[in-house]
Image (spheres, rainbow, N blue to C red):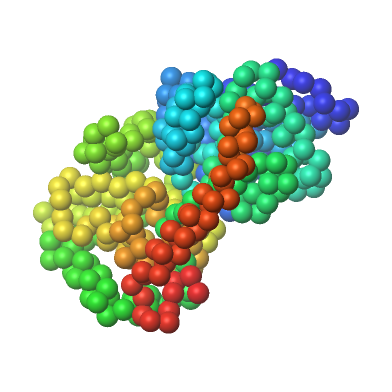
């Protein structure tokens, strides 16, 4: 459907990212810090069968055109559930049910299954951003009201864009991730120097345990990565998810991993663990992505349990690689308070919400300040218990 807004602009809702030429989408996405809004990543989610209507992620992207030129876009999905978001709104779904309000479907803006900060509208730099955002918000509101969509939600919002969207009436909900910040470290040992003596010994012991197990860790990036390794990574990912049963959150298909190889391996960083008996096939791997001075941890798995291999493959070796490559920020992925013991302070992130039912909107507006205050208290409490030397903090 194409709706004429002004002589200058036309607006289109699309259900397949492939309907937009990659070169036009990436003209908007490549300048951003995040890699997760690029055409190749999002299109792979759809064509691999990972983010589809059958999986409860119906692509419903908003695009804005001037003549035949794409000048703005918003990756959006109609959701029939809240899985794969990592912002847990089940209490809102329960409240809606008690009030007799249909909570699903809802409209969601995020990179599917990717709890990493950076979501925003993609807007060409030479356009009037305020005008384009106003058009897009009006179009979203009209779409949701016309189709009886309960809410519009943007998760892991870009901090600067969040401030803009708050001015458009979206309510900000505070959460936290565990993020490593490079404080000018020259080496991994330099980084270890920030810890108190007890935790410094623990980290050295954990890395030594991996060495004693006869394991060698190797970092591979871009063209160094053999094609077969992407399929191997799926096997590790799948096995890890299966170990957690229903909570395993196995959202991605084998095809998703395999399709990263042709045109997206330049973003991929694998940490592969090899044992002494087999130097050809890894016994464990972690999967990261990088862009600019950012590193993002995503998935991991191993054929058998090795003491501390998870910590080394997912945290220590990526940090060592990050220091060597002047990476400034490392987001290791969702969950896990054990991250704070290894140098990842609790770091705020925000989601943005708009309810179209007046009762839900009133409750959200009435309680969100207190909810955010309590979340900030939790962040502060976590960061008071970081294992750094007295007087030092990885955030300082």
Of residues 394 and 97, the one drawn nearer to the viewer in this rendering? 97
Residue found at x 58% / y 32%: 360
Q: Nearer the viewer, residue 102 or 65?
A: 102
Up/down of 7 relative to 394, above or below: above
Residue 217, percent from left and from top? 26, 60
Q: Is residue 384 left or right of residue 117?
A: left
What residue sits 60% from the left and 47% below the top? 172
Residue at image position (37%, 32%) is: 251
Query: Residue 338's quadrant in the figure?
Result: bottom left
* 168 on left or right of 188: right
Give above or below for 329 relative to 60.
Answer: below
Can see residue 184? yes
Query: Which percent across, then down, holds residue 37?
Result: 56, 42
Q: From the viewer's perspective, is residue 284 above or below residue 392?
A: above
Residue that protrudes farthest toward the right in the picture:
7
Q: Does 77 sit left or right of 306 as displayed? A: right
Q: Can you say which quadrant of the picture contains the N terminus?
A: top right
**Image coords of residue 114 (percent x, y):** 46, 42
Percent of width and height locating residue 49: 42, 25
Residue drawn 60% across the image and 23% down it = 149
User: In which quadrant of the rendered view does residue 76 lie?
Assistant: top right
Disc count in the image? Answer: 0
Do we see residue 59 in this rendering? no
């Amino acid at each position: 459907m194409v709706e004429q807004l002004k002589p200058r602009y036309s607006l289109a809702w699309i259900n397949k990212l492939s309907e937009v030429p990659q070169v036009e989408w990436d003209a908007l996405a490549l300048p951003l810090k995040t890699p997760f809004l690029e055409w190749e990543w999002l299109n792979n989610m759809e064509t691999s069968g990972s983010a589809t209507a059958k999986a409860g992620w119906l692509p419903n992207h908003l695009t804005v055109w001037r003549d035949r030129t794409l000048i703005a876009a918003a990756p959006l999905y109609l959701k029939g559930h809240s899985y794969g978001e990592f912002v847990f709104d089940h209490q809102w779904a329960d409240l809606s049910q008690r009030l007799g309000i249909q909570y699903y479907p809802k409209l969601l803006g995020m990179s599917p299954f990717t709890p990493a900060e950076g979501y925003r509208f993609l807007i060409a730099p030479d356009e009037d951003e305020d005008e384009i955002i106003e058009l897009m918000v009006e179009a979203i509101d009209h779409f949701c009201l016309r189709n009886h969509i309960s809410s519009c939600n943007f998760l892991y919002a870009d901090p600067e864009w969040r401030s803009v969207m708050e001015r458009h009436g979206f309510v900000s909900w505070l959460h936290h991730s565990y993020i490593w910040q490079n404080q000018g470290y020259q080496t991994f040992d330099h980084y270890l120097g920030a810890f108190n003596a007890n935790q410094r010994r623990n980290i050295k012991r954990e890395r030594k345990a991996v060495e004693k197990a006869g394991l060698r860790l190797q970092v591979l990036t871009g063209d160094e990565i053999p094609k077969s390794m992407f399929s191997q990574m799926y096997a590790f990912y799948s096995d890890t998810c299966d170990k957690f049963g229903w909570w395993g959150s196995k959202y991605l298909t084998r095809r998703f991993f395999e399709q990263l190889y042709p045109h997206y391996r330049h973003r991929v960083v694998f940490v592969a663990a090899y044992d002494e008996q087999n130097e050809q096939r890894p016994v464990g791997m972690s999967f990261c992505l990088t862009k600019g001075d950012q590193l993002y941890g995503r998935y991991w798995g191993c054929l058998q349990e090795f003491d501390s291999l998870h910590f080394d493959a997912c945290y220590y070796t990526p940090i060592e690689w990050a220091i060597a490559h002047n990476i400034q920020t490392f987001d290791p992925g969702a969950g896990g308070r054990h991250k704070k013991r290894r140098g990842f302070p609790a770091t705020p992130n925000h989601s943005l919400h708009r309810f179209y039912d007046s009762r839900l909107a009133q409750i959200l507006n009435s309680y969100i300040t207190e909810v955010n205050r309590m979340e900030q208290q939790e962040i502060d409490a976590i960061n008071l218990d970081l294992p750094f030397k007295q007087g030092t903090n990885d955030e300082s």
